[in-house]
Amino acid sequence: MQNKVINYLKSLGLFKIFVILFILGLIYGASSLYLKYAYFSKFMNQTRVTSVKAKPVTIDVAQYTYRALSVIESDNSVDITSKVNGIIDETFFEESSYVEKGQILYTIISSDKVGSTKIYAPFSGIIGLSKKKYSENVSKGELLTSLDNYEIMKLPLDLPERLLPYLNQKLSFLATTDSMTTYEYYGQLRFIDTRIDRQTRTIGAYALIDNHSKVLKPGLLMKVDIFLEENNDAILIPEESLLSINEKHYVYIADQDTAKLTEVKIGIKNDSAIEIKSGLSSNDIVIYMGQEKLKDGSKIKILN
């Protein structure tokens, strides 16, 4: 009976019509869904606005510096020791005072020979505390006191070998100390070693600074900023605005309400800013917050 009905429908062409209508319905439904999805996606891309923060580039001096720590020393320092075995007979100085070159510091009654031995200051400077007092026994070579010339101080430095290309020129520096924040000392590196330490991969250097005021003392820890390179009128951007993709550098520029991804070449890196060698102009505005949510051409709203 069923076969008769189907044969009958076939004879009328209704089965073919049904199949065709069913296929057309599927095509229409799929097309409608695709068009709705495409329209929705386009609508979302066109209307989505990302809030960002941006600022104009800065035109300033780009300065590449290296910061090191140094324990300051006097340029001329010596330990005063006894030349004989004996007893301290007399001292001729006040502790922590200035003494002249050739001034008598001690007389020692020698136990090795008749008479006394005199100890002289080998140069002018500040005498330290006396380790021995009147009538105390001393041995030959035993430390009596110290003598330092404070007028010129030495800043010893161990610099990493990566700075070697900069060390063939005169380098300026700024030395400061946390214990005396009002004091700043400028100078130039003058003495650089000829060899690199094989274990530490550093090269020794030191600088001399004027200390006629006698403010600095040996043993004081100082911060030394060495100026390696300097470019005037450089374009600077915040460090956080820079993106690195496949070993290339990019920034987003705010062009009214649109973000534009721009490749740049970087130069000197300061503490919080980076020099841009190419890719930006002096009137560009760069996005430094919220750029991780952006694509080239994204709509943006700049927050104050």
Image (cartoon, rainbow, N blue to C red):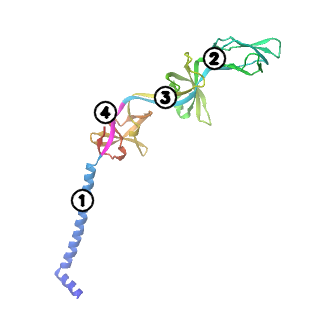
| Mark drawn on residue 195 | none
Provide the residue designation for mark 4: 283
Question: Can you tell which quarter of the image residue 3 is in?
Answer: bottom left
The segment highlighted magenta reads 50-58
Mark closer to the chain start, 1 or 4 = 1
Q: Position of residue 289 (x, y in %)?
A: 36, 41
Q: Tell me if mark 4 has few (under 14), some (14-19) or many (20+) residues whose alpha carbon lies within 10 angstroms of its own.
A: few
Mark closer to the chain start, 2 or 3 = 2
Q: Position of residue 111 (x, y in %)?
A: 82, 16
Mark closer to the chain start, 4 or 3 = 3
The answer to whether residue 171 shows anywhere in this view is no
Q: Residue at x 26, y 57 (%)?
A: 38
Q: Residue at x 22, y 75 (%)?
A: 19
Provide the residue designation for mark 1: 36
Mark closer to the chain start, 2 or 1 = 1
- What amino acid type is highlighted by mark number 1? Lys
Of the pair 248 and 300, the residue shown nearer to us:
300
| Mark drawn on residue 96 | 2
Mark closer to the chain start, 3 or 1 = 1
